[in-house]
Image: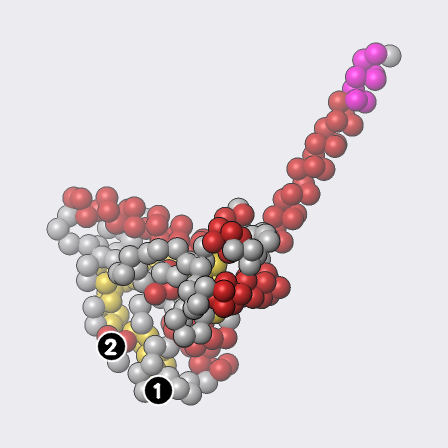
Amino acid sequence: MKFTYFRLFTVLLFTILLSGCLYPQSERAENDLPNEAQLEMVQTAVETYRENRRGLVPIKTKGSDTPVFQKYLIDFTALQQANALTEIPGNAFENGGYYQYTLITPEDNPRVKLLDLRLTEAVRQVNVQMNFYRNEHIYPPFGEEIAEGVFTIDYQELGLESPPRVISPYSKENLPLVMDIEGNVYIDYRLDLTRALKEFGQEGYSNGEDLRYLLVEHTPFVPAYSLPYAVKDGEPVFSAAS
């Protein structure tokens, strides 16, 4: 009888613990998605902070050579200390989520966008392999030159089983990684830009304006780890090749 009670108690305890573990996972899954309400909440907090700080914006200090879409990361601590924000969004990196909140055009018209950290990790892994390769070779593992100064990556030389790709935050399609003449790794967003041109048009971008902002203006995400693009014959091309 005691053994039966012990078994029942063990099963009940396991069920309680299991349900306790499952709830945070389901909640975490929701927090891993872009959320318009959370974006608006942070946008309002940034505007409040800016009004109270005479035009200053709550960003972390980055070097001047930091790429533009990774440069203006929002400082949630500053927002909270200024009583502009009560809680950090659940999908933010600072709260265990997949996204870093960042600003575009912070000087003139600061707008809150998301940087998908899964891109960061994918690029980082290729960069690790690239560094190993560069320690033993003079030149990076150049593949085909697809634009002036832009190359595919010879993944076999790099010791990879297949060409490196990342999942697009825009289309959920696989996007290839490319590199420049110095071996710096970037994401090739031409697939997403082609779709954006068809959906939103190219007005304002035919005069050489950076086409990446077409994605920024119409979606919650920034095209992190990217080279500039332009429009040529109605198609997105790397700016160096336009």
Percent position of residue 191, x then y: 41, 71
Q: Give the vertical position of 25 relative to 47 (above or below).
A: above
Percent position of residue 216, x then y: 45, 72
Percent position of residue 167, x then y: 46, 59
Residue at image mark 2: 241
> Pointer 2 and pointer 1: residues touching (CB < 8 Å)?
no
Image point (31%, 68%), residue name: 227
Q: Nearer the viewer, mark 2 or mark 1?
A: 1
Label at residue 63:
none
Task: Determine if the magenta segment contains residue 23.
Answer: no
Task: Determine if the magenta segment contains residue 8.
Answer: yes
Image point (33%, 75%), residue name: 229
- Looking at the rendered image, the quarter that the C terminus falls into is bottom left
Front in this rendered view, residue 166 or 89: 89
Task: Name the quadrant containing residue 6.
Answer: top right
Residue 99 visible in the displayed image: no
Badge 2: how crowded within 10 Å, few (<14), some, or many (20+)? few
Is 16 on the left or on the right of 119, as rendered? right
Badge 1: how crowded within 10 Å, few (<14), some, or many (20+)? some
**Mark 2 or 1, nearer chain start:** 1
Is 77 on the left or on the right of 176, as rendered? right
Q: Identify the secondary structure beneath mark 2.
A: helix
Image point (65%, 43%), residue name: 24
Is 140 on the left or on the right of 101, as rendered? left
**Main SS category, magenta section:** helix
C-alpha separation, residue under disc 2 versus residue under disc 1: 14 Å
Residue at image mark 1: 206
Residue range corresponding to the magenta coloring = 2-9
Image point (75%, 27%), residue name: 13
Residue 55 visible in the displayed image: yes
Q: Amino acid at mark 2?
A: Ala
Q: Give the vertical position of 188 relative to 127 (above or below).
A: below
